[in-house]
Amino acid sequence: MPSIVGHPYQGLWVAIATMHGKVKAIAPALCQCFAMTVTKAPGIDTDALGTFTGEFPRVGTMVDAARQKAKLAIARTGAPLGIGSEGAFGPDPFIPFLASGVEVLLLHEAASQHEIVVQRRTETNFAHVIVRPEDPSDTTLIH
């Protein structure tokens, strides 16, 4: 992926609110395309805003939850940009006996309050991974 020269977010700092390794998935594209500095916002319990499994109910929509996470990331770090994500799994809305997942990713700009929201529905098999405490954590990535 080539770098996007002259983009308004070129070289900015973005903080991501996550407890589940999203920095590893999101940072490479932002670093490569926009030369951004990407940081995991520390100390944010994103599960308290709702979990896709329902243990903690989500208040509002998936976009509302992602927005709260992005704003918390900005508040915690002072970064000009924040990213929040929210996912859900369940029956496909068009073919209910098939499983599908939805992922929402929201970038919030503190100064202007502008937002970029993307959403993607994917197939899933409800597979899972067990992460142990000794596994490497997602830490700050710097371009």
Image (cartoon, helix red, strand yellow):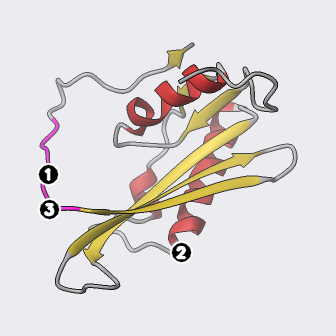
Is residue 98 shown above or below 47?
below
Say whether residue 55 is visible: no
Main secondary structure type of the part rendered in magenta: loop
**Residue beneath label 3, please?**
125
Amino acid, disc 1: His
* Disc 1: which residue: 128
Q: Along the line of sight, which residue is nearer the eye, 78 or 88?
A: 88
Query: Which residue corresponds to the image point at 55% horizontal and 50% vertical from the top-left?
Result: 84
Give the alpha-carbon distance from disc 1 to disc 3, as whole Å: 9 Å
Instruction: Give the farthest residue toward the right.
Output: 112
Q: Position of residue 130 (x, y in %)?
A: 12, 42
Mark pair 2, 1: CA separation: 24 Å
Would residue 91 be found to the left or right of residue 50 on screen?
Answer: left
Disc on res. 138: none
Residue interval drawn in magenta? 124-131
Q: Is residue 138 above or below residue 105?
A: above
User: The C terminus is located in which quarter?
Assistant: top right
Q: Amino acid at mark 2?
A: Thr
- For marks 2 and 1, the one nearer the N-term is 2
Quadrant of residue 37 within the rendered picture: top right
The residue where tag 2 is placed is 61
Q: Are marks 2 and 1 in contact (CB under 8 Å)?
A: no
From the top left corner, tell me how far across and down residue 73 is, in percent: 61, 41
- Report how many numbered discs are placed on residues in the image: 3
